[in-house]
Image (cartoon, helix red, strand yellow):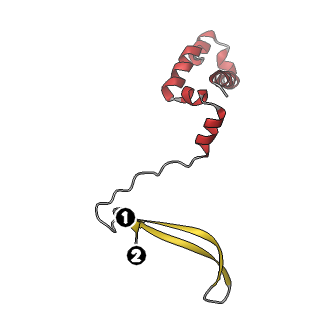
């Protein structure tokens, strides 16, 4: 999808949604953006650059998870500990003698960047 296609889709949506208003020439002039203005606004928001990227690059960006909400800062060991649990492809016997899936849980101290004990 390129910026020209986006322009045409936006124009179609506006024309469908505001049919009655667009019959008045003054109202049509107010509602419809000039193509150059539309392109400028797309540049301002960064969408034009995004749409100019090849489809493969856009797909790669979309498949990556978003970065963390905010970075973790810790001044002393033990102040912030990050915990992660991953399933293992191992079966084990539980306390009740039932077969269960094993999980690995690790805790990492942010300040010292070591595994917590």
Of badges 1 and 2, nearer the viewer stands 2
- Give the quarter of the image for residue 60: top right
Residue at image point 51% right, 29% down:
46
Q: Are marks 1 and 2 in contact (CB under 8 Å)?
A: no
Does residue 100 sit above or below 2 in this rendering?
A: below
- Give the quarter of the image for residue 3: top right
Please provide percent x and percent y for residue 100. Answer: 66, 80
Quadrant placement of the C terminus: bottom left
Does residue 3 sit above or below 104 in this rendering?
A: above
- Tell which of 63 and 43 is nearer to you: 63
- Residue placed under numbered mark 2 in the picture: 117
The answer to whether residue 34 is visible is no
Judged left or right of residue 9, residue 27 is: left
Does residue 12 sit above or below 26 in this rendering?
A: below
Please provide percent x and percent y for residue 77. Answer: 32, 67
- Residue placed under numbered mark 1 in the picture: 80
Counting labels gives: 2
């Amino acid at each position: 999808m390129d910026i020209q296609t986006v322009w045409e889709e936006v124009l179609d949506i506006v024309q469908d949604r505001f049919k009655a208003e667009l019959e008045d020439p003054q109202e049509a002039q107010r509602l419809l953006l000039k193509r150059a203005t539309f392109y400028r606004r797309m540049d301002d928001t960064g969408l034009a650059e995004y749409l100019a990227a090849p489809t493969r690059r856009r797909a790669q960006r979309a498949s990556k998870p978003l970065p963390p909400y905010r970075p973790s800062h810790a001044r002393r060991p033990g102040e912030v500990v990050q915990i992660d649990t991953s399933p293992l492809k191992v079966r084990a016997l539980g306390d009740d003698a039932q077969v269960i899936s094993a999980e690995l849980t690790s805790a990492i101290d942010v300040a010292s960047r070591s595994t917590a004990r």
